[in-house]
Image: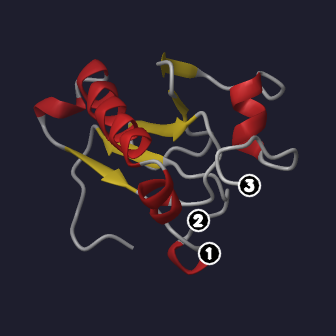
Amino acid sequence: MAGEPQADCLFCKIVSGEVPATVVRESETTLAFRDINPQAPTHVLVIPKAHYPDAASLAVGAPQLAADVLHEAGQVAADEKADRSGYRIVFNTGSGAGQTVFHAHAHVLGGRGLEWPPG
């Protein structure tokens, strides 16, 4: 069920403290932590604490929570000073787009030039 913790979800385990992560920000509804395989000097994941499998289901099922994730992504960029030169917020939705953990999450990338188009 959307919103409920999933026993087999890595990010739900990070939220519960069962799996460690380098947390950089936490709000009542979100958690932000460093990516274990960073693709830029700043690479932080911002997740809703509630489980939604992807960005689309999060937006439909909990639009305020989706807004919380975006708000925190901007705060992460400011904290990391990536907002000075520019940063990217990426939601991969579906395995064909590169999503490997099926818990909605935003990648905050910055600290270097980010070419377009990505991928």
Q: Quadrant of the C terminus?
A: bottom left
In the orientation shown, which residue stands out farthest toward the left?
Answer: 84
Task: Give amino acid for label 3.
Answer: Met
Lower sequence index among marks 1 and 3: 3
Query: In the image, what residue occupies the spot 57% across and 73% down?
Result: 94
Q: Could you say whether the residue bearing mark 1 is in a helix, strand or loop?
A: helix
The vertical placement of 115 against 82, above or below, is below
Residue 10 pos. (x, y %): 76, 44
Residue 62 pos. (x, y %): 46, 48
Residue 74 pos. (x, y %): 26, 33
Q: Quadrant of the N terminus?
A: bottom right
Q: Quadrant of residue 70?
A: top left
Q: Quadrant of residue 22?
A: top right
Task: Give amino acid for label 1.
Answer: Ser
Give the spatial CA distance, label 2 vs label 3.
Answer: 20 Å
Tell me whether circle 1 and circle 2 mark residues in contact (CB < 8 Å): yes
The residue where tag 2 is placed is 99
Give the spatial CA distance, label 1 vs label 3.
Answer: 20 Å
Label ID, residue 1: 3
Q: Quadrant of residue 69?
A: top left
Dot in front, 1 or 3: 3
- How crowded pointer 1 is (Cα within 10 Å; few <14, some 14-19, many 20+) is rated as few
Lower sequence index among marks 2 and 3: 3
Dot in front, 2 or 3: 3
Label ID, residue 95: 1
25 or 63, which is in the foreground?
63
Query: In the image, what residue occupies the spot 28% across and 31% down?
Result: 77
54 or 10, which is in the foreground?
54
